[in-house]
Image: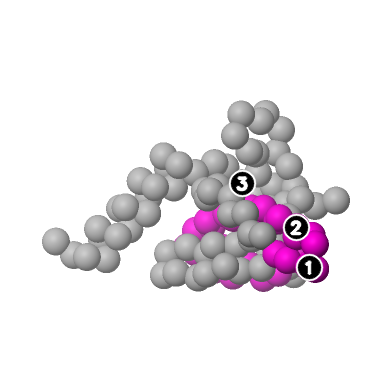
Amino acid sequence: MDLALLKAQVREVNFTLHGVPAVVTPVGDGPVDTRVIWLAAVSEVRPSGADFARSETRRILAIRRDDVPAVPRGSTISVTEHLQEEPDLWKVDSTEATFSDHHRVVVVPEA
């Protein structure tokens, strides 16, 4: 069996089962309808001084590369979260990783 074909099938299954519909609008480009996967939020504790520290929760999305080849910082994503009816607007803050089949981006709520 062709390994590339198997990887494509796994990607399709993952985004079909775990993904939610989204509209990704890369900076300087038009909106793209796709599916994205909310990954587990990551909390990081960052010391800001000797007596206090702050904790930041990073929200991470996986976005298909075959639908959206590039997701630069500042791109917007309209997507629902778990059990929500209306989508919220999120802004790409940074790219966590880029793989052969998807991007992992850190998003923040669009104010």
Question: Which of disc 1 and disc 3 is earlier in sequence?
Answer: 3
Image-based side of 24 in relation to 74, left or right: left
Q: Which residue sits at x=30%, y=53%?
A: 9
**Residue depth check, mark 2 versus mark 3: number of the one nearer the observer:** 2
Q: Nearer the viewer, residue 45 or 6?
A: 45
Mark earlier in primary sequence (2, 3): 3
Residue bearing mark 1? 50
Residue located at (49% from left, 58% from top): 64
Q: CA distance from mark 2 to mark 3?
A: 31 Å
Which of 87 and 42 lies nearest the eye of the viewer?
A: 42
Residue 110 point in image, percent of width and height: 80, 52
Looking at the rendered structure, the kind of residue marked 1 is Ala
Q: Is residue 76 visible?
A: no
Which residue corresponds to mark 2? 54
Identify which residue is drawn at 70% across, 56% down.
Answer: 56
Closer-to-camera residue (99/40): 40
Q: Residue at x 70, y 69 (%)?
A: 73
Q: Is residue 28 left or right of residue 42?
A: right
